[in-house]
Image: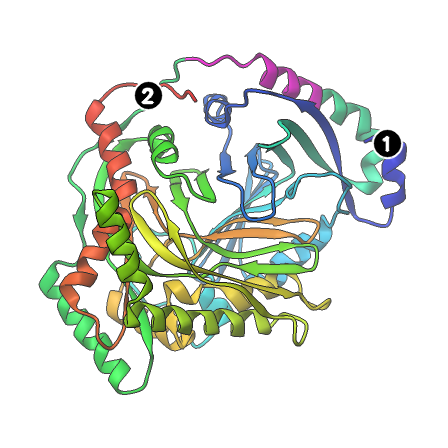
Amino acid sequence: MKKEDLAIYADYPAVPVTMQFKVLQFNPLNLVSHLRQQGHTSYLLTGAPKPKLDGYTFIGYQPKMKIHYRNGQLTVIKNGKTTTKKTAIKPYLEELLNRFRTPKLPDSPPFQGGLVGYAYDYGQYANPTLSSSVSDPYQLDDVDLLLADQVIAYNQRTKIVTLSQIVPTNELNNRFEQVQVQLGKLKRTILQLQQSFVPVTLQLKSALQLQFNLPTFTNLVEQTKQHIVAGDIFQLILSNPQHADMAGSLFAAAPTLFHQSPSPYQFYFQDGDFEALGASPETLISRQGTQLVTYPLAGTRRRGKTEAEDRRLAAELQHSEKELSEHNMLIDLGRNDLGRVSRFGSVKVTSCRQLLRFSQVMHLGSTIESEVRSDQSSIDILDALMPAGTLSGAPKVRAMQLINELEQNKRGLYGGCLGYLDFDGDLDLCIGIRLAYRKGTNLVVHSGAGIVADSIAKYEYQEFNNKARSVVTALQQVAKQEVHYAVNN
């Protein structure tokens, strides 16, 4: 878009300056690897196309700011300077999104600039009754965000790359040509980048080990069921992280995981000594214009070893009273959550209990849609939806209180969300599942199981392994090879 075309958006604080071109063979992993070699903090958000939408790949580099929030303290890193202060997180994020508010340009990708990152323990700030007094051995952030004012977006259907740079409107006249030159250099880098052997390694220094053994977990299940009988909750998601020591980078496992686990959300996120890698099947919340969509998944079976066994397990899942009642309960919770920020009467279940098959497990999935109220911001939506009931329980706040009491450990990214909040008001956040994250040399693979009144502990315990298998397999395969990993298609 030309500079004069952007003049009509003078009332916005900022605008995206863009450049578009076609690339028939686009390798996002190779591009991220190149950015990493240049020393850039980077992220990759990609995955299979979602219903009614083109599939997109988003890559960010050189974030304008890094935003960390932990135990009520905000840390901002900008231009090499670090500032810290005690402050509320919501007003800060609201002001930041307003400061860089941009228009939605015609024929533009869904994300051109905004906040990218993750959160789970952010929930305690939206719900002050939640306690933060749990063990935090890895010193994990409650919120970890990058302010991305430069984005590489790739439309998987049209093969069009869009390079975006967010520029304050009052600087547009002076900076437009300079930004075009910078985008031109990035375009040449992308077009010239060759499929090369990229030295990325991953080593497991110890075996992955579940935090809770079966006897301990069985006791936790019994305590949960006592709360259900007492009427405190109807359901609760107990998680059981696996821990190991590692060296190298989780990025080494990205080609294997992404190939073996096709899903709507595949991501790699890195900030300092924190990395996250995952292939999540589940949307927490997506906003495009005024439309909100959430896709709750609840009810699980492993994939069969044969086609006949796969069909048998699918039929078992689709007719299980326990799984159906659990799924229905979480549909209601999703409807209630959306209702808090939606126009009255607009919340609708548009698909219900569809069988969805993934690489290692199958789920029941539903779609809930609504029209957002005009007075609701991106952070209001986040407050209403996070964390998903499918990863906490019902009623949600009481379930989260009990999770803290029972697990006694900070969850980090698991069960929270990861994705983007666009400066134009749109957002797309997946639920933090089917993932691994690293803090320093500490590796965590996190999974959970939904506990209801008739849950049997040994079966729920096996669900941890079923849900984590794709991630664990990818990590072990790469680590076992003990070779530099070539990042290729």
Could one spot residue 132 in this view of the protein? yes
User: What distance separates the C-alpha of mark 1 from that of mark 2?
Assistant: 43 Å
Instruction: Identify the magenta region.
Output: 183-196
Q: Quadrant of the N terminus?
A: top right
- Residue at disc 2, secondary structure: loop
Which residue is located at x 54 percent, y 68 percent? Answer: 384
Asked whether 190 falls inside the magenta stretch, the response is yes
Q: Quadrant of the C terminus?
A: top left
Which x, y percent locates residue 235? 32, 74
Asked whether 45 falls inside the magenta stretch, the response is no
In this rendering, position of residue 410 left or right of residue 462: right
Please say if the residues under marks 1 and 2 sit with CB atoms less than 8 Å apart.
no
Q: Which residue is mark 1?
A: 3
Q: Which residue is mark 2?
A: 485
Which residue is located at x 72 percent, y 51 percent? Answer: 99
Q: Earlier in the sequence, mark 1 or mark 2?
A: 1
In this rendering, position of residue 100 left or right of residue 323: right
Along the line of sight, the residue nearer the viewer: 48 or 218: 48
Count of numbered badges drawn on the protein: 2
Q: How is the image coloured?
A: rainbow
